[in-house]
Amino acid sequence: MSKMMSRSGLAIALSKLGVFKDPKVMKEQYPTDSEVAASMLWNAYALGDIEGRLIADLGCGTGILGIGALLLGASKAIFVDMDKEALEIAKSNILKVESESLGYTGLMPKAKFVCKDIREVNVNVEVVLENPPFGTKVEHSDRLFLEKALETAPIVYSFHKSESKSFLEKFATQKGAKITHIWDFRFPLKASFDFHRRQTHRINVSCFRFEK
């Protein structure tokens, strides 16, 4: 990062990133809203969990959270996804940011890309950022991602449906962790598939910060 990134500048940069070209419904491949991502990342930055930290973006999709972390000064970001096409878009998004975002260069050498099923991932980092599937298509996929995240880092930021709070508190306790912060959002799911009837459908989603 060659200069200080503001919160509004972060949101603008993230809004320019490419999204899924052919989203897969069973993988719940919905793009993460740039304003929501910027808010989550800025909160993590304010708590000292981004700058100079080794980050993993699990189920990274097109890379918005990991790229945002790099823009805020993360020392390295590991982008993990089982979809090769999504990882290619994430790579092109980093190049796009470097070429268009007014001097934010040197990001690609800090990025590592891992194409694996979440169950096969074995990395150790300081902080995990993730917007996992909510488990609406494949039951318990959200639990699978959170369990892996808590194995991967002592600090985890993870998006889940707000109604899951009680379950997540119990799950965290079982894993030797606790929820320290919760940020609530009206998460916009933009029409991505033929069966969608509305251009944008908003759901109650929260970002939970877990700490071990």
Image (tube, rainbow, N blue to C red):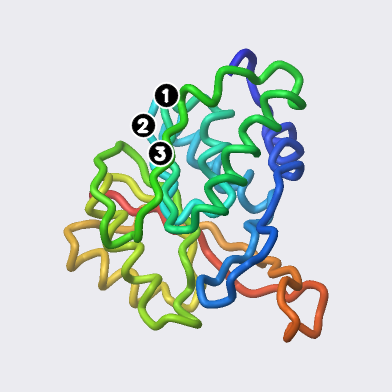
Quarter occupied by residue 8: top right
Q: Quadrant of the N terminus?
A: top right
**Residue position for label 1:** 75
Is 169 placed left or right of 134 in the picture?
left
What residue type is disc 1 on? Ser
Relative vertical location of residue 75 with respect to residue 142 in this rendering, above or below: above
Contact between labelled residues 2 and 3, with CB atoms less than 8 Å apart: yes
**Mark 1 or mark 3, which is nearer to you?**
3
What residue appears at the point 56 percent right and 53 percent down from the top-left corner? 86
Mark 3 surroundings within 10 Å by alpha-carbon count, few (fewer than 14), some (14 through 19), many (20 or more): many
**Residue position for label 3:** 78
Mark seen at residue 54: 2
Note whether residue 185 is visible: yes
Is 138 placed left or right of 86 in the picture?
left
What residue type is disc 2 on? Leu
Mark 2 surroundings within 10 Å by alpha-carbon count, few (fewer than 14), some (14 through 19), many (20 or more): many
Tag 2's secondary structure?
strand
What residue appears at the point 46 percent right and 25 percent down from the top-left corner? 110
- N-term mark: 2 or 1: 2
- N-term mark: 3 or 2: 2
Tag 3's secondary structure?
strand
